[in-house]
Image (cartoon, helix red, strand yellow):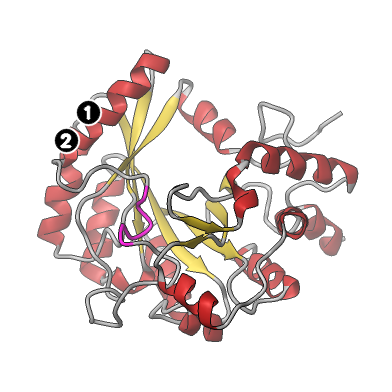
Amino acid sequence: MNTFPYTLDNKRYHTYNYFLKTKYQKKIAKVSLNAGFTCPNRDGTKGLGGCIFCSNSGSGDFAGNVYDSLQQQFNDVSKVMRHKWPDCQFIAYFQANTNTYGSVERLRNTFEPFVDYSNVVGIAIATRVDCLSDEICDYLEDLSKRTDLYVELGLQTIRDNTAQLINRGHDYQTFIDGLNQLRCRNIDVCVHIINGLPYETYDMMLDTAKAVGQLDIQGLKIHNLYMLKDTKLHQMYIKHPFDMLSREDYISLVVDQLSYIPENVVIERLTGDAPLDLLIEPKWSIKKVTILNDIDKLMKAKDIYQGSNLKKESK
């Protein structure tokens, strides 16, 4: 019998579905939006071209059309979702690029309209820790008092040499400083990490999860590295091929990583999505449902729950 408390469907980790249904008591869906921001490692402030794995859309391959207004983007996507779930309400998810990379005035103009939408329960903002000035954090704190606010921070890895290789543009200490800026204002944070970054070993990736498990965070997204056509990562791979994670190693790694994440942390994602017309590798990532099913099976076979190794170490 599964005794893990934070699931509605017999999982062994704290599912996002459980979090949303328990908090809101209804169907909630995220609407991905593109507000037309850029990134400091794209525009020359800290670098050019962005992180080496990003496409031109800046990790917003499934966000709205940047040429449409945000309201139009939201209406188009939410209308489709309401056909499937008539009573659905939404989280406005600002996904593409760095959504606090601008003036407070621009942020207000971007986010404020969604505070008053009757069918929007909250706002999720994807950003970078080096784009969180005191003034911006103060505004986010104010915003969090008027709507449910979730800030998503890309970490990817705790290793500074890997961060430099992928053109991240900041180090791990900067990440910690930015996270603390948000948490001291009681803003909920979801952290992103990537498994399979060039030249990282299994143990290095596990160390990233162990470190994240010690942080004051409320959510976690685990992505597999995927190589997209014409990205800097693709160009690097052509010149200097490196080993990519196999499907089996990815599943095993995620299971081990989850064992070091406190059970109260919401697991929002366990595998990434890539646009099929751009995907070079890994081809196994296309079958997302089977990956999730095999993670479940391995957790059961190894009798692992989210946070189970933390509990063993505390005894």
**What residue would you read off at disc 2?**
71
Number of numbered discs on residues: 2
Q: Is residue 57 magenta?
A: yes
- Residue 103 x, y percent position in the rendering: 14, 65
Residue 90 vs 155, above or below: the answer is above
Q: Main secondary structure of the magenta part?
A: loop
Residue 1 vs 115, above or below: the answer is above
Q: Relative to the observer, which residue lies in front, 171 or 46?
A: 46
Residue 164 vs 260, above or below: the answer is below
Magenta residues, start to end: 56-61
Quadrant placement of the C terminus = bottom right
- Residue 127 x, y percent position in the rendering: 34, 61
Q: Is residue 270 visible?
A: no
Q: Is residue 73 visible?
A: yes
**Disc 1 versus disc 2: distance between alpha carbons?**
6 Å
The kind of secondary structure element at disc 1 is helix
Circles 1 and 2: CB atoms closer than 8 Å: yes
Question: Is 70 on the left or on the right of 160, as rendered?
Answer: left
Residue type of the residue flagged with mark 2: Gln
Dot 1 alpha-carbon crowd within 10 angstroms: few under 14, some 14 to 19, many 20 or more: few
Residue at the location (56% across, 47% down)?
A: 269
Q: Relative to the observer, which residue lies in front, 60 or 85?
A: 60
Residue type of the residue flagged with mark 1: Asn
**What residue would you read off at disc 1?**
75
The kind of secondary structure element at disc 2 is helix
